[in-house]
Amino acid sequence: MKQASVLICISVAASVCFSGVLQAAEAQPVSWADLAPAQVEYDNPFTELSMDQVDGLRRLLQLRSRNTGDDAKSSQEAATLQAELEKSGLDVDLLFAKREEIIQIRKAAATGVNEAVLGRQVRLPGYVLPLEVKDYKSVEFLLVPTVGACIHTPPPPANQLIHVYYPQGIEVKGLYQPVWIQGQLARQQTVKTVRYVDGSAKIEVSYFMEPIRVDPYRE
């Protein structure tokens, strides 16, 4: 019986070891560019307009957005400006509809995920931006593609950020440190609060991972 127990323990240990090796072998390296969805081609009529026409459309949009209907002066200015733009050959309402379409396309490009990387074992390098620290170890963080991302600079697109939850934690040696993470990527549209010494910021994130391992970065 004792010999059988020993054999079982050896078998379990070997199975766990083999499973870990297999997981490491199956992990596919991905780049940050791989996280973005395929680009959508679209027509942009604004590139063919003169600077005066673009400025006129911008001014008209401002007038429309602040006009509540009881501002006769703004209403008259908007009507005059629209007539001038249409006289120059522009279909104002069509251009504004196209503007909304382009906004939605660009938003999808910035926040959408690449379905091909979801649910796969992947390995990706990046920098740790701590969100929660316990006993000098970061157990929750954002993985960002560049040093300085999200700190007093416009954050990267949401699909260029990964919200990472790692209960065993990684030792924090500075505000940013390079690591490799390995695990399955999931779609999770969230907004995380990044705190600084002098304030905080809300950061939109499109990906989530509970990695099976986090290692110091080595090429």
Image (cartoon, rainbow, N blue to C red):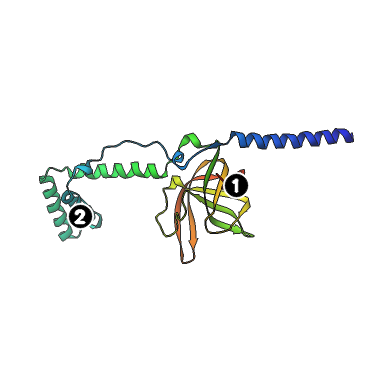
| CA distance separating discs 1 and 2 | 51 Å
The residue singled out by tag 2 in the image is 59
> Could you say which is closer to the camera, residue 182 or residue 68?
182
Crowd class of label 2 (few under 14; some 14 to 19; many from 20; radius 10 Å) = some
x 34%, y 41%: residue: 105
Question: In the image, which disc is placed on residue 54?
Answer: none
The residue sitting at the front extreme is 219
Q: Is residue 16 shown above or below 58?
A: above
Depth check: 204 or 27 in front?
27
Residue 194 rendering spot, x and y as whole percentages? 49, 58
Q: Residue furthest bottom?
A: 198
Q: Residue at x 16, y 49 (%)?
A: 53
* x, y percent for residue 217: 56, 48
The first of marks 1 and 2 along the sequence is 2
Q: Amino acid at mark 1?
A: Val
Kindly indicate the quadrant of the structure image that contains residue 172: bottom right
Measuring from the top left, give residue 6's x and y in whole percent. Answer: 84, 36
| Residue 214: image tag | 1
Which image quarter: residue 59? Answer: bottom left
Q: Residue at x 57, y 53 (%)?
A: 140
At mark 2, the secondary structure is helix
Q: Nearer the viewer, residue 89 or 80?
A: 89
Element carrying mark 1? strand
- Residue 177 x %, y %: 54, 54
**Horizontal arrangement in the rendering, residue 100 relative to residue 143 (left or right):** left
Q: Nearer the viewer, mark 1 or mark 2?
A: 1
Q: Does 68 sit above or below residue 124? A: below
> How many numbered marks appear?
2
Q: Amino acid at mark 2?
A: Arg
